[in-house]
Image: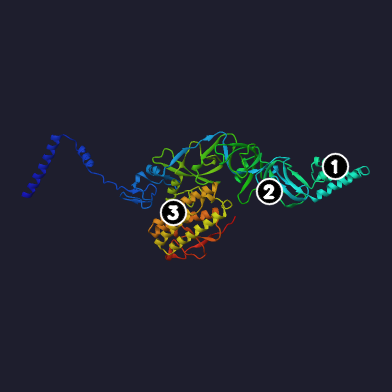
């Protein structure tokens, strides 16, 4: 009973206390509930850090990217957009890669400037040979060295000719019977004229009756002695060449034009040219002739122009560089800068900046290009006026997309919905044999890397990756021109990136992932340019990378799987072959 009384007293006291509090502070109970709710702190979300260039890297503390050693940033500041064709980059990554963009527009009549290399040559129509008109022995030469300037009618040589002596005597004998048979004397004179004996010599012979043993050879044409063909004491036949002459007062300028440029060049087009021998001087002429046959070795045709050379400043065999500016079709032309295009061909790749994005975002875009016009390409399809394309740092953007396994010029195996990857271009006819040999040497270094991964030896694979990088530096890119050169530069930068990752990695799993990208690039490169001296095989493992599948190159049909090693050494099949191509 006593305990019950204590409980009742406690309850009443609590009620009195609550009532007093209400009267003293006069605040509604709801406000207290709200304040209590505010007093409860939400648990802090854990900050995740990632790499601007490699968003697959995730960790819960700041540091350096294990792939490229860039400083990690909070995940909210750097992410890769979904969809496979857009890439988000941080402002820091933009700055480091020096990414710059240009808004494309249209122009009216566009001009195409074609650069030509060539040399000065003597005009073949002005070349001549000075011959001996009578047979005999060279007694004296008045022109004695190559390069000597000769004028028409100038004395060149003295010839002793027994036949000429006999002909003179025949004329004298015929003159004795001229009254009886005048035709006999006339025939003897005509024989001397055919030997180009000067008329004054014939008149002197008839007047004096003295036979001359030597005759003088006079120049039939003016020019420079290109070659002296006889010496004093030589016996020459009638019609035998004594000197090779060339008139250099007017010259030919011979240019080499690549076959893709021939459609824009016509006879009559003006060409301006310079020569390093005469710096600061520009010469102008017009194309007079276009060779109808393509040189199968250089894939060029010869263009010929003519130029006056009265002062002799220009000389045969001088190297020249010319340019022809040809106007394209009038009307509005949509142009994209050359630097925005990663590789040229029927299908080419650019990166378009997405407008009004919260972070810099770039879209992988395949475009159809037309002809090159100066530093730009005509756009047939894939871009619109006012779009902003990456014109500097394009390879860095593409490399970031590729390393994230997104659609990129260098990683066409990534399939984007509604977009099929373009086939590799065919530059086999443009690739010199020496380049194909260097590509074969590079493939041999690749095979060493493949064998190291078959043995699951990360140290040997790292060394082979470093050796592959050295092989890339030994490939002479100057052997390629135009679109073939641009395509190789894209492949080169990508292969350097992946081979470098293999050389730095210490885990075989990471090396095999980079080896997949490297294999695809090398397969595509060999298909584009061809190789010399071997037959390689493309092999495929359908179970690699969680059944995504992966290819590699082998020099034998036996399957030795570099993606699994001893675990599944024989897993795979021969998918294709890469034959040796020769020009």
Which of 104 and 178 lies nearest the eye of the viewer? Answer: 178
Which of 462 and 230 lies nearest the eye of the viewer? Answer: 230
Q: Which residue is mark 2?
A: 228
Q: Residue at x 48, y 36 (%)?
A: 386
Q: Which residue is mark 3?
A: 498
Which of 294 and 122 lies nearest the eye of the viewer? Answer: 122
At mark 2, the secondary structure is strand
Q: Earlier in the sequence, mark 2 or mark 3?
A: 2
Q: Is residue 229 above or below residue 560?
A: above
Tell me, yes or no, if residue 541 can be seen here.
Answer: no
**Residue 158 % position (x, y):** 74, 46
Q: Marks 3 and 1, how far apart in space? A: 96 Å
Residue 425 located left or right of residue 41: right
Q: Is residue 543 above or below residue 218?
A: below
Tell me, yes or no, if residue 572 can be seen here.
Answer: yes
**Residue 51 % position (x, y):** 37, 48
Which of 172 and 541 lies nearest the eye of the viewer? Answer: 172
Camera-side mark, 2 or 1: 1
Q: Which residue is mark 1?
A: 206
Q: Marks 2 and 1, how far apart in space? A: 35 Å
């Amino acid at each position: 009973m006593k305990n019950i009384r204590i409980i009742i007293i406690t309850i009443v006291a609590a009620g009195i206390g609550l009532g007093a509090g209400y009267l003293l502070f006069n605040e509604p109970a709801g406000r207290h509930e709200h304040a209590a709710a505010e007093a409860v702190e939400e648990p802090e979300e854990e900050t995740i850090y990632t790499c601007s260039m490699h968003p697959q890297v995730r960790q819960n503390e700041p540091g350096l990217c294990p792939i490229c050693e860039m400083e990690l940033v909070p995940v909210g500041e750097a992410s890769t957009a979904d969809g496979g064709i857009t890439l988000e980059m941080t402002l820091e990554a933009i700055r480091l890669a020096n990414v710059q963009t240009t808004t494309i527009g249209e122009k009216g009549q566009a001009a195409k400037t074609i650069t030509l290399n060539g040399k000065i040559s003597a005009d073949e129509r002005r070349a001549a040979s000075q011959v001996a008109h009578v047979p005999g022995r060279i007694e004296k030469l008045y022109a004695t060295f190559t390069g000597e300037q000769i004028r028409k009618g100038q004395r060149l040589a003295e010839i002793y000719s027994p036949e000429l002596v006999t002909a003179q005597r025949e004329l004298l004998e015929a003159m004795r019977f001229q009254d009886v048979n005048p035709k006999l004397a006339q025939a003897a004179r005509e024989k001397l004229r055919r030997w180009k004996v000067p008329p004054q010599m014939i008149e002197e012979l008839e007047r004096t009756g003295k036979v001359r043993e030597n005759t003088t050879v006079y120049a039939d044409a003016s020019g420079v002695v290109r070659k002296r063909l006889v010496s004093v004491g030589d016996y020459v036949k009638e019609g035998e060449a004594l000197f090779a002459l060339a008139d250099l007062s007017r010259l030919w300028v011979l240019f080499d034009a690549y076959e893709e440029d021939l459609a824009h060049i016509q006879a009559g087009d003006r060409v301006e040219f310079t020569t390093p021998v005469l710096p600061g001087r520009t010469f102008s002429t017009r194309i007079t002739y276009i060779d109808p046959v393509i040189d199968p070795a250089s894939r060029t045709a010869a263009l010929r122009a003519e130029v006056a050379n009265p002062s002799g400043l220009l000389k045969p065999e001088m190297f020249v560089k010319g340019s022809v500016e040809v106007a394209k079709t009038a009307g509005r032309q949509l142009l994209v800068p050359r630097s925005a295009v990663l590789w040229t061909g029927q299908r080419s790749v650019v990166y378009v900046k997405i407008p009004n994005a919260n972070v810099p975002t770039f879209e992988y875009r395949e475009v159809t290009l037309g002809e090159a016009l100066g530093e730009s390409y005509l756009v047939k399809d894939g871009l619109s006026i006012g779009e902003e394309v990456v014109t500097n740092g394009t390879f860095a953007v593409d490399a970031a997309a590729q390393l994230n396994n997104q659609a990129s010029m260098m990683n066409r195996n990534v399939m984007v919905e509604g977009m099929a990857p373009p086939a590799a271009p065919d530059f086999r006819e443009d690739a010199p044999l020496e380049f194909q040999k260097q590509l074969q040497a590079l493939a041999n270094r690749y095979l060493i890397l493949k064998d190291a991964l078959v043995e699951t030896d990360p140290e040997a694979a790292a060394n082979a990756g470093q050796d592959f990088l050295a092989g890339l530096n030994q490939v002479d890119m100057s052997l390629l021109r135009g679109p073939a050169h641009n395509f190789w530069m894209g492949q080169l930068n990508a292969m350097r990136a992946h081979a470098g990752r293999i050389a730095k990695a210490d885990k075989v799993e990471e090396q095999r992932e980079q080896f997949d990208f490297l294999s695809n690039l090398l397969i595509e490169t060999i298909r584009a340019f061809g190789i010399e001296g071997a037959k390689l095989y493309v092999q495929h493992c359908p179970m690699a990378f969680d059944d995504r599948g992966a290819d590699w190159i082998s020099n034998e049909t036996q399957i030795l799987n570099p993606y699994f090693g001893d675990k599944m050494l024989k897993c795979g099949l021969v998918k294709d072959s890469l034959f040796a191509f020769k020009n």
